[in-house]
Image: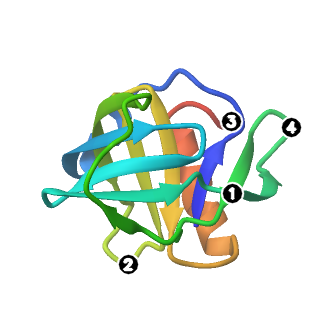
Amino acid sequence: MIISPSFNYNIQTHCIQCYYLKSFQEVRFNTDDFIYEIENDKIYKFKHFNTDNHVDINNTLSFYLKNDSPEKILVYHVPINATYTNNRVDKYKLNQNSLLTLYIEENKKFYFHTNETNVTHSIKDDMITFLSLLKLYN
């Protein structure tokens, strides 16, 4: 499941550098119907993520819950009308056994990922910890 904020927030990553795991490049082409992604020298297309639900952390922070397992289909071309994005994505985790991973794109946009199907107490606690470190939660 992908947990993304309802609004864009200004973030500062210097407080979470000790939780840094790795960085990678994400190359995507967006159209109205599909997202095309280059992965291991192959092109895959999949539908945009559906917003399944909504969760509020407090009065000012709310997040969309999205199913993150769309079916990827191998294709051999990208449509001409696609919008190209090439983002550097940084990956953070509170500890090795944490169920939640934080992804930050270009130090601007962030989202969380978990393999769980529901937001458990443990996941919510990890979210609050990351949000506090990012100075978004009091």
> Would residue 118 be found to the left or right of residue 132 on screen?
right
Residue under numbered circle 2: 97
Count the labels in the image: 4
Residue that appears at 52% across and 49% down: 34
Q: Is residue 74 in view from this perspective?
A: yes
Q: Position of residue 124 (x, y in %)?
A: 66, 63
Residue that appears at 61% across and 55% down: 49
The residues bearing labels 2 and 3 have C-alpha atoms spaced at a distance of 25 Å
Q: Amino acid at mark 4?
A: Asn
Q: Amino acid at mark 3?
A: Asn
Residue under numbered circle 1: 50
Q: Residue furthest left?
A: 41
Going from N to C along the chain, the mark reached first, 2 or 3, is: 2
Residue under numbered circle 3: 138
The residues bearing labels 3 and 4 have C-alpha atoms spaced at a distance of 11 Å
Q: Secondary structure at mark 2?
A: loop
* Foreground residue among 131 and 43: 43
Question: Tag 2: Cα neighbours inside 10 Å, few (<14), some, or many (≥20)?
Answer: few
Residue under numbered circle 4: 59
Q: Position of residue 99 (x, y in %)?
A: 48, 73
